[in-house]
Image (tube, helix red, strand yellow):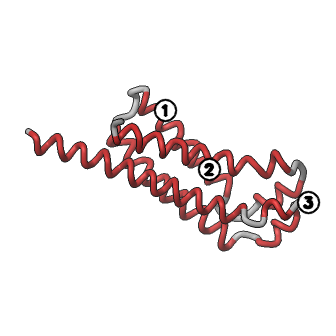
Amino acid sequence: MNHERLSLGVHAVSAAALLVLLAVPPIVVPGTGVELYYSWNGPGPLSVGLLASGMVVGVLLQTSGFVPRETLAGLVVVMAGILLLVATGWALLGQGQAAMALPSIEEFVYHRWAVLAFSAVTFGTALWYADVVLRSGHDAESAE
């Protein structure tokens, strides 16, 4: 299998998995506790979800031929880097007591840390894809 397609596919799956992880609390625990849990005066989980959605759309556009692979590689690295910074800020500086608003707290004790871990994986897969794209471009230039 082509390393570029593999790295792009793994990146898309990691971004989509992050979206699923962010959607779990509103689905499992409907009500106002989730709104308080996701509320924060800075960029937080909704920003992470928006960036992850943008990366999934970018991958779909690239596979359709609308976005050059070099452009997408740079874009996903920047977006995933911002995503990781936002997730880190929310996990470390967010309102810890807001998690207590959830009626079934046992399920969400580690949710923030899982979001942070998935964000780190998404950043790593973005770096992997960019590395593969840059190496293939460099190899093509050296072959000439």
At horizontal 64% and vertical 46% (from top left) the residue drawn is 19
For the residues labelled 3 and 1, say whether their Cβ atoms are less than 8 Å apart: no
Q: Earlier in the sequence, mark 3 or mark 1?
A: 1
Looking at the rendered structure, the secondary structure element under dot 2 is helix
Is 59 above or below relative to 47? above
- Residue 37 percent coordinates (x, y): 80, 61
Q: Which residue is mark 3?
A: 103
Q: Earlier in the sequence, mark 2 or mark 3?
A: 2
At horizontal 37% and vertical 46% (from top left) the residue drawn is 73
| Count of all numbered marks drawn on residues in the image | 3
| Image quarter in which the N terminus is found | top left
Task: Judge by depth and name the residue closer to the eye, 39 or 103.
Answer: 103
At horizontal 48% and vertical 44% (from top left) the residue drawn is 10
Q: CA distance from mark 1 to mark 2?
A: 17 Å
- Residue 43 percent coordinates (x, y): 64, 60
Task: Judge by depth and name the residue closer to the eye, 78 or 108.
Answer: 108
Mark 2 packing: few (<14 Cα in 10 Å), some, or many (20+)?
Answer: many
Q: Which residue is mark 1?
A: 60
For badge 1, the amino acid type reads Leu
For badge 3, the amino acid type reads Pro
Is 14 above or below relative to 81? above
Q: CA distance from mark 2 to mark 3?
A: 23 Å
For badge 2, the amino acid type reads Leu
For the residues labelled 1 and 2, say whether their Cβ atoms are less than 8 Å apart: no
Q: CA distance from mark 3 to mark 1?
A: 37 Å
- Residue 17 percent coordinates (x, y): 61, 46
- Residue 68 percent coordinates (x, y): 34, 35
Please tell me in which quadrant of the rendered image residue 105 appears: bottom right
Q: Earlier in the sequence, mark 1 or mark 2?
A: 2
| Image quarter in which the C terminus is found | top left
- Residue 18: numbered disc: 2
Mark 1 packing: few (<14 Cα in 10 Å), some, or many (20+)?
Answer: some
